[in-house]
Image (cartoon, helix red, strand yellow):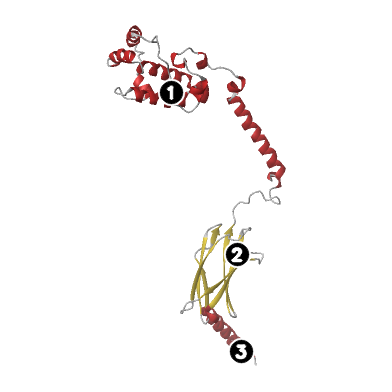
Amino acid sequence: MKEICLFGFILGILILSSLGLSFSEQININIDNTAYKKSDIISIWGSVLDAPQNLVFVTIKNFDGDMVWTEKILVDEGGNFSTLVIAGINGWSKSGTYEILLESGNMVGSITFFYESGPQVNPPSAVNDFYISQEDLILTFVIATAVVAGIFVYLARNIILGKKTTYDNLDLNSKKNRDYEKYHSDWSEEEFFSNRKNNSKDQKEFDQMLKNNTLPNYYQVLGISQSASKIEIKERFRILAKEWHPDKRKNSSEDKMIEINSAYEVLSDEHLREEYDKYYKLL
């Protein structure tokens, strides 16, 4: 009797093993990795024999059993299927072991992987000490606005207080016979300088600057060639004066503006330019 029972037990095990092997051959599911981070691509593929209506269902569940993804997939003539899933799509908020279920009729296959959801941004329940409330954000915005306004007032203090810069106090020929609007508005076709009766520089001054190695390269200052015409000199000066005027750049451009004015006064005057060119050739 004992021999009969033992034989029946062994036979049952063999039958169950055979059924399990047969089942494993009928449904198969695979993935390309064992761990994924947010936004990674999960490649899922496998095969199913005799799938009803040539359809299988793929479902992904987190470790709490919550479904985070489901998809209906067609299988080909050989029973093969494949799909791609973006890890974290539709808000997979928890890190842990996730399970992929493959369902075809009464057959179910599964495979697991680890998912890393990444750092959470200010979740109140997890990092209360660092959570920024709406009131804090409003206060931060108000402080930032006050700081920006303070910086603007400081930079524009000379204009607000009507304080003149060093350049404004200089007595330059290039500033004579011009009103405020000419100098600050978009440049018109009017002359920048009236006819000068007296030149600010003469032959002796050029000679002294050459000896002292302080003779400026006025062509380089204006960014023109030695063969530039009067019209080219005037147009170039207009561009530089508009760019470097102290009312636009404040104190940082005063020296540059003085240099530009000096170059224009010399090169725009035929006599001065002729005298200057004699010494320029010796540079």
Please name the amino acid that badge 1 sits on: Glu
Q: Position of residue 30 (x, y in %)?
A: 51, 70
Mark 2: amino acid = Tyr
Quick one: SS at disc 3?
helix
Indicate whether 277 appears above or below 14.
above
Q: Which of marks 2 and 1 is in front?
A: 1
Vertically, is 154 above or below 214?
below
In which quadrant of the rendered image does the C terminus lie?
top left
Of the two numbered discs 1 and 3 in the rendering, the one whose residue sits closer to the viewer? 1
Task: Give the label on residue 190, or none.
Answer: 1
Q: Categorize mark 3 by other alpha carbons within 10 Å: few (<14), some (14-19), many (20+).
A: few
> Are dots 1 and 3 in contact, CB under 8 Å?
no
Q: Is residue 237 visible?
A: yes
In this rendered view, identify the residue nearer to me: 2 or 101: 101
Residue identifier under label 3: 8
- What distance separates the C-alpha of mark 2 from that of mark 1? 79 Å
Mark with earlier residue (1, 3):
3
Q: Which residue is drawn at 44% across and 23% down?
A: 241
Tag shown at residue 133: none
Image quarter of residue 210:
top left
**On the image, numbered disc 2 is attached to which residue?**
98
Extreme front residue here?
A: 190
Distance between mark 3 and mark 2 Cα atoms: 40 Å
Between 173 and 5, the one lying in front of the other is 173
Considering depth in this image, is 12 or 226 the residue closer to the camera?
A: 226
Residue 170 x %, y %: 49, 13
